[in-house]
Image (cartoon, coloured by chain):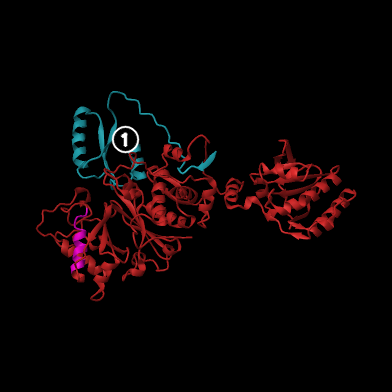
Chain colours: A cyan, B red
Amino acid sequence: MTTILDPTDERVPVERQVTTRTGSLAGVIGLLDISKPRGNVLLDEVEQLLAKAAPGVSMRRYAKPTYTKPCPDALRHQIRDECDYLVEALAD
Amino acid sequence: MSKAPRDFLLTDLAGASHAYPTKRASLICFVKEDCETCNTAAPVLEAFKKAHESTIDVVLIAQSGDANATFAQRHGLTMPVLDDTSCKTAFEWDIESVPSVFWIDEAGEVKTDFEGFIRADWEALATDIATHTAQAAAQIDWASLPEWRPGCGSKHLDPTIYDKLRAEANDSPIRARQIDIATSDDVAEFMFDQGFSDGLPLVPPTPERVMRMLAGTKRDPQELVATVPPNMGEATVEKIAINAVMAGCKPEYLPVVIAAVEAACTDEFNIHGVTATTMGAAPVMIVNGPIREKIGMNSGLGALGAGNRANATIGRALRLVVRNVGGASTGGVERSTHGNPMKFTMCFAEHEARSPWSALHVERGFDAEDSVVTLFAMTSGPVHIVDQNSRSPHDLAGTLGLGLDGALSPKMRNLPVDALLVVCPEHIDTLMKEGPFSKADLRARVQEVTARPDADQSVDGALRGDKKGDAPKGAKFASEDHIHIVVAGSEAGKFSSAFYGWVSGATGSTSVSKKIKD
């Protein structure tokens, strides 16, 4: 038998379930622009469509400083605290 | 110099268990079947046993596997011959050679211990035991025995066994999870199946190999070097050592790999983006300073290619850390459209002796005597720039400049993107033939020959944010600061090379240098 040492970080990912779908939209929807070119154009369209489809919801816009790096913790926490849903726009 | 006896539980030749301590005084001797001095001592030990077995325990701790029985048979031994083929007990008792004798009283105090066969020591031991037990001393024809014979090295000091024992010892620095691979499984295939590999075979990171790798640094194995994106896995010195073993590194390369991991995981270098981008970037690693010679890196013939273990495996080790500790697997967070071979490894040393300029690390603020690793995020290269005709510095520098013209796309001008020019020695000679020709001269010439005031220009939207305005109209690079220059290659050949960058600067990746520490 050969014994080797684990080269990974040995962490077991937390399993998360998809949030239960209610069939309706209410609350606050965050729209996150990852700062790729024209991401704002896409989110403008999405915002308009959502406003028409679900007049009751409010929307907040966010932007990552750069698309090349993970979202800063502070921004993630802000979005978590302020929103019920999040749409993240990848564009080019 | 009494050593403290350690508890043990070993089996004799018949498979019966024998524990230490017992409540009786003990004479314990470590032996090896193929040791001539142990064979000299064996009849003496048997005589001690026969004389005092009613009052003391006499046991042998034998290191020779199946040959332990041969040893016992050869000398007609009647005492327990305990199996220590793994050498764990020898390791714990910290002996150096065999035979190693310990005469221990009922309270566990070592009264006498010695190694080898010095007849006077053994005779004195016979007297001590007789006195202690108030029994007649063993009948031994001392005159027939040699006066002095050195012992043999204990088997546990064999490097492969010793490192394994150190890895398994209670105070082992190893903390990583141990994975047992069944004998029926192929180790190489198992590691592929676990996703540890970059696609090439790996060296199995056994505890003993990792112990040897850790000897390459003075750092604490549990020191946290960096958190590695995308999973923000914790790269301790030990985890980096495990991946360095898999990559094929020698222990002396480990400090370079550690410094490279440190550099890669800075916010400036942004290995997350370098890994994740569809554009296909990879770290290009350049090593400067005395460590290049010390560990046998290649800065000359074929420096950018295959054939040198240090160059190849140091670059690979960084990639494996990002893959295994960071969790960046191809098709997972690693998402480049084409990928490129630099994602296996891309590491070389600068040919400082052949450079007329400050070495890269000195240019970046380090002392010449520092050993430094510098990482660039590059999407392509090395791209050859061939010029066998230019005879003047002006002409050749123009060629080198035009060699960078195609970076990312020939249509792209004013690029806020790094490029790395690797100038070969013959081109250096041409550049210097009319007197000093500085890096600044070369950079200016690059911008001059690539200027396209009237060209149909475009800059990729993703890069537009970093655009600067200090370059000639339509020049290739937004700033001369983006043009990095080093020297490498063999004496023969008028072939320089270029690497083209990724998204450079705060929105993407900035090149990072880290000092290599012992």
Residue B230 x/y as whole percent: 37, 44
- The reply to whether the magenta stretch includes residue B400 is yes
Left or right: residue B273 compared with residue B173: left
When asked about the image quadrant of residue B86, the answer is top right
**Going by the picture, which residue comes out furthest to the bottom?**
B435
Left or right: residue B317 compared with residue B93: left
Residue B277 x/y as whole percent: 29, 45
Looking at the picture, which amino acid does disc 1 mark? Cys
Magenta region: which residues?
Answer: B395-407
When asked about the image quadrant of residue B397, the answer is bottom left
Question: Is B514 rendered above or below residue A8?
Answer: below
**Going by the picture, which residue comes out furthest to the left?**
B454
The chief SS type of the magenta part is helix
Question: Is A13 rendered above or below residue B434?
Answer: above
- Closer to us: B312 or B50: B50
Q: Name the residue that disc number 1 marks.
A: A83
- The reply to whether the magenta stretch includes residue B409 is no
Q: Quadrant of the N terminus of chain A?
A: top right
Q: Quadrant of the C terminus of chain A?
A: top left
Q: Residues within 10 Å of mark 1 (few under 14, many from 20)?
A: some
- Closer to us: B170 or B286: B286
Residue A88 x/y as whole percent: 27, 37
Left or right: residue B214 compared with residue B513: right
Q: Which residue corresponds to the image point at 67% horizontal and 45% vertical from the top-left?
A: B64
* Label 1: chain letter: A
Q: Is residue B228 visible?
A: no
Residue B450 x/y as whole percent: 16, 61
Q: Is residue B452 visible?
A: yes
